[in-house]
Image: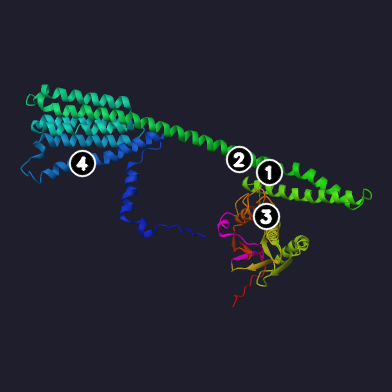
Amino acid sequence: MTSTTTSVPTKAAMKSPVWQIGKVWEWLAEPAKSVTQPVQRRRARLLASLMIIFAPLGPVGYFGSLLAFPIRQPLQDPLFILTMGTSVVLFAAYWLSRTHRHMWGAALALMTISAATLAAGAIVPANMNTLLIYLLVPIMLGSMLLPARATIALIASNIVGILLMPTVVPAIHFAAVIIPLIYTVILSLVAVVSSGVRAQDVRQIEQQSQDLAEAVRQAEIANKLKDQFLANMSHELRTPLNAIIGFTEVMLMGLAGELNPQIERAAQRIHFNSERLLKLIDDVLDIAKIEAGRVEILRRPFKPAELLETAEMSLRPQATKKELKLVTMLDPNLPKQLFGDAKRLEQILENLVTNAMKFTEQGSVTISLQRQSVEEWAIVVNDTGIGIPPHAQETIFEKFRQIDGTSRRAYGGTGLGLAIVRELSLLMDGNVKVKSSLGSGSTFTVTLPLLVPEGTSNVWKTPN
């Protein structure tokens, strides 16, 4: 058996600086709740993240350059005024990114970056070639943040701005803008094409997500209707079967007249198979009720000794028929009275013992009620049967799961008995586990919380 360990972050790890920075960044970039569509939320979050980086980038770069050129006077420098103004506008774009007007924020930010780049080229004509390359930044960002039409409009405005530079600034020759213009046109085409492909992929993914969500919803509705149907069929299915069982019992007792041996054997087979069918129907209906949430656990005082005696009386005929020894054991440390649902506990015992007898050809089946600790007690069923292979022990409690699932399997049943045991155990805040090896039998243990009625002695002597 393979054990899986899940690691839980420690408090020290959760308070690490990296974790705190990540939480702060997530809070700063999270859009408003009014932005509900996934695509719009993604764009708003991306815009906010970019503005967190770009808005302070200009002032930091400018003041960093003062270290290399300390004689520069910021208030008299057009680049300083341009940098500060751009940062203010980008902070405004960041504020818009946190609202449902984030598209206006994206347009404002990208147009501002483009205009600032062109203005910087006009202020420093000598660096025109280098500065105009930065126009590619808003174009690439626009392909991610804006719809296709808005991206094309941004590209067109940048190209027009580049072409107007030699006219507006006489110090700039037309030859100086040729290379930046070619780069801008080529990469603009790449950005538009990639944006269109990405948008198509996103639409396909969203459509697939919607189709999947609808399929899941329809499956949930169908499953709920199925559960409700099975749960509501209890009376309709059990009534005719109980009638068949009742009339065959009347016939077998001779109350309807003496039967010849052939008819008596036929009546016995009808009675046996009707009871078997009723048990199968009960299992299916029980699991359906559990899944539909219609099983209520009634916690009332009961005596473990009476629970064990009832189980023995109902199961001993089955053990006798298979020539198996049925052993019952009651832990003396177990309180005389417990608090729980005796009917459901009987069902757990019946399913466990029936399962044990089904896979035990010779030997014995042992039922024991044990006290595990101050807070827990257990139902333990041990057999000397064929055992369970290791790979099946992980899945044996699943619905309709059997060790041999073929149509020619040697053992009958629906594969619901152990699933019902698990579900009922969970409903009682307990659990069930199995320990088994091939050829050496199996031990099923249902552990439950030890609840004692008020006024009942709960003394427990620790085992030596």
Quickly name the residue at label 1: 231
Identity of the residue furthest to the bottom in this view: 464
Few, some or many C-alpha atoms within 10 Å of disc 1 (few <14, some 14-19, many ≥20)? many
Seen in the image, is 59 located left or right of residue 189?
left
Few, some or many C-alpha atoms within 10 Å of disc 3 (few <14, some 14-19, many ≥20)? few
Which amino acid does the dot numbered 3 rest on?
A: Leu
Element marked by disc 3: loop
Residue nearest the observer in this picture, 305 or 186: 186
Q: Distance from label 1 to label 2 (Cα)?
A: 12 Å
Quickly name the residue at label 4: 57
- Callouts 1 and 4 close, C-beta under 8 Å: no
- Return the disc, 3 or 1, that comes first in the chain's sequence: 1
Which amino acid does the dot numbered 2 rest on?
A: Asn
Q: Distance from label 3 to label 4 (Cα)?
A: 67 Å
Quadrant of image for the C terminus: bottom right
Inspect this view and state whether residue 105 appears.
Answer: no
Q: Distance from label 2 to label 3 (Cα)?
A: 26 Å
Magenta extent: 375-395
Residue nearest the observer in this picture, 283 or 461: 283
Element marked by disc 2: helix
Is residue 223 magenta-colored? no
In the rendered view, how is the structure colored? rainbow
- Can you tell which of label 1 and label 2 is closer to the viewer? 2
